[in-house]
Image (cartoon, rainbow, N blue to C red):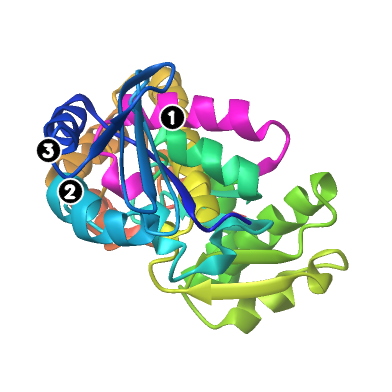
Amino acid sequence: MNTNSFTFKLNTEQQQELLQILKGSKYLPATVPHTQIAASVPDCRIHLYNSGKLLVQGKAAKEWITFTLETEILKEVTLGSEELLDPEACQPHMGIDESGKGDFFGPLVIASAYVDEKLVEKLRELGVRDSKKISSDNVALNMACDIRKILGDRCAMVTIGPRSYNRMYAKIRNVNKMLAWGHARAIENLLEKVPDCPRALSDKFGPTHQIERALMDKGKKIKLDQRTKAESDPAVAAASILARAGFLYALKTMGKEHGFEVPKGASEKVRREAEKLVAYNDPGILLDTAKCHFQTTDKVLAEVGYSRKDLPSPT
């Protein structure tokens, strides 16, 4: 792995700021095809391409990224430079992440994504980052489409719809154990497609042994890692976007089926929409649309003259 070569995707404002910096007297200009500007300082070559892709190479690349690019342009620690702290980020592995856990309406979606060095470079050029940092649903949906084009068959998704979710929760009574089951299935499903994947990484949401116990024969052979803020890893970031897109698609489908625009989260707006849904139907509609162990369920039912005893069994 070449640890002296880094790529970034810059937006228009960042490109303009970089152009001004690279025109400074300490930079030696160069001619490189398809670039807006190319320059160098000792042991570091910097190429800004017409596409907005930035390529930084050389023995001093890490230093330039840390003290110039991050501080003056990006104003954050980036995925590209995080491989200095995490050398495994570009090595073959899969990332797993979920979406919908904190949303009253909709399913729980868990996605897995496989990467190697070449795939990581393509994902970074695309600007892949944790879905929680993407505020626009359309951006997440479009980026997920691009990720699928890059990964091809090297990703998998597990969707636990509301009815199945409520049935599982009635038996397990523990969201982390349900997450572990979903993560294990996402790992197993991806191993069917990439059987030689040596490692799986996810965000830490509970004891690692919960996932390990849920793994079947193929999964028991893989090294399983969990860590906080795992979304900084390119495979986990890709999985987080795929899971988010799967969740958003599910909400759109649910909205068409039941005739309302399904809100995200568990806000007052969510409660009002749930109250309308129950009032127009009956409490049983929540089993097919919502995660009924949320306290929101009790508040919604009380507002329209019902209680939890009026909720049918999900089994």
Q: Which of the two discs, 3 and 2, labels the residue nearer the N terminus?
A: 3
In the rendered image, which quarter is residue 2 located in?
bottom right
In the rendered image, which quarter is residue 181 located in?
bottom right
Whether residue 150 appears in this view of the structure is yes
Judge left or right: residue 208 versus residue 41.
right
Identified by mark 2, the residue type is Ser
- Element under disc 3: loop
User: What residue do we see at 27% from left, 60% from top?
Assistant: 66
Which residue position holds label 3? 24
Q: Position of residue 214 (x, y in %)?
A: 72, 71
- Element under disc 2: loop
Q: Which mark is residue 267?
A: 2
User: What residue do we see at 33% from left, 25% from top?
Assistant: 52
Residue 133, compared with residue 101, is above or below; it is above
Q: Which mark is residue 143?
A: 1
Identified by mark 3, the residue type is Gly
Magenta-highlighted residues: 130-156
Q: Position of residue 310 (x, y in %)?
A: 38, 53
